[in-house]
Image (cartoon, helix red, strand yellow):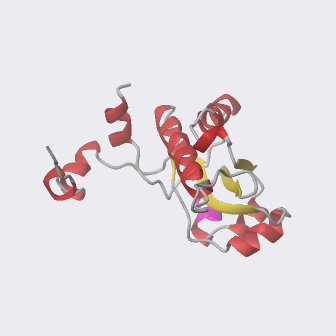
């Protein structure tokens, strides 16, 4: 599939079919994250695949556990392993964002839906998953077969035109 067409196909999915994900598809999505670029190739990420519904209820917003979500990937950043710019800027968040974007696109390619969730209780998630201090849960990514769809041309209506977001300097 053409990359731009795939990007337009991808959307945030909040309702899933009550259907298991084939292991090869889940591994494909995780492989997409593994090969994502990171600052100085430090790869400061950890991916935790949660299929346990009780655990999902403890670490995610209610709609995630109640929407037939077959799996959720908890994407964590290890700040100890992140590259830092000379001024001290930690690039862990940026590296995580790139990896999650790779996962959402890979999921869409194999007909799975995802929803990037940052609105969750990170402290509760840390406790529930028994994460070490330097590892921060940054994104929850519910994943499964979409029970809803969105039109591919929605971007013409929902996104700002290029003229509003691009400046040209010659």
Q: How many marks?
A: 0
Residue 15 image point, x, y percent: 51, 57
The vertical placement of 163 against 54, above or below, is above
For the C terminus, the quadrant is top left
For the N terminus, the quadrant is top left
The vertical placement of 2 against 60, above or below, is above
Q: Quadrant of residue 132?
A: bottom right
Residue 118 image point, x, y percent: 56, 66
Is 106 on the left or on the right of 156, as rendered? right
Is 10 on the left or on the right of 31, as rendered? left
Q: Residue furthest front?
A: 86
Residue 24 drawn in magenta = no
For the stretch drawn in magenta, the main secondary structure is: loop
Q: Quadrant of residue 157?
A: bottom left
- Name the residue at 82% across, 62% down: 129
Q: Can residue 94 be seen?
A: yes
The vertical placement of 119 against 112, above or below, is below
Is 134 on the left or on the right of 20, as rendered? right
The vertical placement of 144 against 116, above or below, is above
Front-lying residue, 34 or 54? 34
- Name the residue at 78% across, 67% down: 126
Instruction: Give, as a single range, the part of the protein colored magenta.
Output: 64-68
Residue 33 image point, x, y percent: 61, 39
Q: Can residue 145 be seen?
A: no
Front-lying residue, 29 or 22? 29
Q: Quadrant of residue 99?
A: top right
């Amino acid at each position: 599939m053409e990359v731009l067409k795939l990007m337009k196909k991808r959307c945030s999915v909040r309702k899933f079919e009550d259907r298991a994900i084939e292991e090869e598809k889940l591994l494909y999505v995780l492989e997409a994250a593994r090969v994502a670029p990171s600052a100085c190739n430090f790869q400061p990420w950890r991916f935790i695949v949660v299929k346990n519904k009780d655990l999902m209820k403890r670490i995610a917003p209610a709609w995630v556990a109640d929407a037939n979500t077959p799996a959720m990937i908890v994407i964590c950043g290890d700040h100890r392993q992140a590259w830092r710019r000379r001024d001290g800027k930690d690039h862990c968040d940026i590296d995580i964002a790139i990896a999650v974007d790779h996962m959402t696109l890979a999921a869409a390619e194999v007909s799975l839906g995802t929803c990037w969730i940052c609105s969750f209780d990170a402290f509760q998630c840390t406790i529930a998953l028994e994460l070490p201090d330097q590892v921060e849960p940054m994104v929850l990514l519910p994943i499964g077969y979409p029970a809803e769809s969105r039109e591919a041309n929605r971007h013409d209506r929902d996104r700002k035109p290029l003229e509003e977001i691009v400046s040209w300097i010659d």
